[in-house]
Structure formats: structure tokens, C-alpha cells
Image: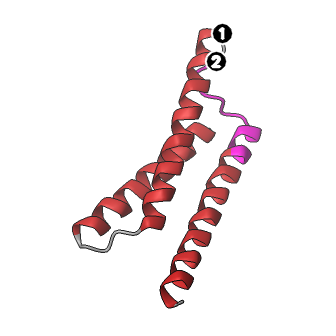
């Protein structure tokens, strides 16, 4: 479940980045967060493949894994907020 949640967050931030870039309003915070979520998605993908090679299900759909996915997405959004705040403070200084 955390794999699916991380991929969804990566896709959302990718869409936000490319639509913002097309309009000339791309942000370093969006780009950094997008890369962070894609890196996490790649990590979870390797874990899913390793689980499948050991004979376990490809995706873990347990409650604990959903909570882990929520924590990962919340942490990414927290980093995004901190990057946005740091960007605003740097521009004003």
C-alpha cells in the first residue's frame, strides 16, 4: 500500500511541476519534493520485487503498510512545506 501511495504522490507532484513549468512558475520546492517521492517509489518498487522473488505477494495491503504510506506522504508534505517556507524567507532577506 505504501508503494501505491508514494507513486500517487510522485505523480501529483510531477503533474504540478510540469504544469507550473509550462506556465513559467516552476518551483525548486516542487521539483525537490517530486524527486524525493520518485526516489521513495523506486525504493519501494525494489522492495516489492524482492518480496515477490521470495514468494510473498507483490503488494502488502495490510493496515500497517497503509499507515506507513501515510507517514511517508505526510513526511514528504512536511519537507515540501519547509522548502516553500525556506524559499520565501530567502527571497525576502
Looking at this rendering, what residue extends furthest in the front direction? 93
Looking at this rendering, what residue extends furthest in the left direction? 22
Count of residue discs: 2
- What residue would you read off at disc 1? 54
Q: Are there few (<14), some (14-19), or many (20+) residues within 10 Å of tag 2?
A: some
Looking at this rendering, what residue extends furthest in the bottom direction? 92
- Quadrant of the image containing the C terminus: bottom right
- Tell me whether the residue at label 2 lies in contact with that at label 1, contact meaning CB atoms closer than 8 angstroms: yes
| Residue at 66% from the left image edge and 29% from the top image edge | 60
Residue 53 higher or lower than 17, as above or below: above
- What residue would you read off at disc 2? 51
Which of the 4 image quarters holds residue 56? top right
Residue 38 higher or lower than 20, as above or below: above
Asked if residue 63 is among those painted magenta in the image, a careful observer would answer: yes
- Label 1 residue SS: loop
- Label 2 residue SS: helix
Magenta residues, start to end: 57-68
**Can you give x and y, in whole percent of width and height, for residue 44 in the image?**
59, 33
Amino acid at each position: 500500500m505504501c508503494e501505491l501511495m508514494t507513486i500517487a504522490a510522485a505523480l501529483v507532484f510531477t503533474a504540478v511541476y510540469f504544469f507550473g513549468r509550462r506556465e513559467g512558475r516552476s518551483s525548486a520546492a516542487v521539483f525537490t519534493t517530486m524527486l524525493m517521492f520518485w526516489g521513495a517509489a523506486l525504493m519501494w518498487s525494489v522492495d516489492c520485487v524482492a518480496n515477490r522473488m521470495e514468494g510473498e505477494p507483490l503488494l502488502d495491503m495490510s493496515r500497517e503498510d497503509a499507515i506507513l504510506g501515510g507517514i511517508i506522504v505526510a513526511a514528504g508534505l512536511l519537507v515540501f512545506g519547509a522548502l516553500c517556507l525556506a524559499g520565501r524567507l530567502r527571497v525576502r532577506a
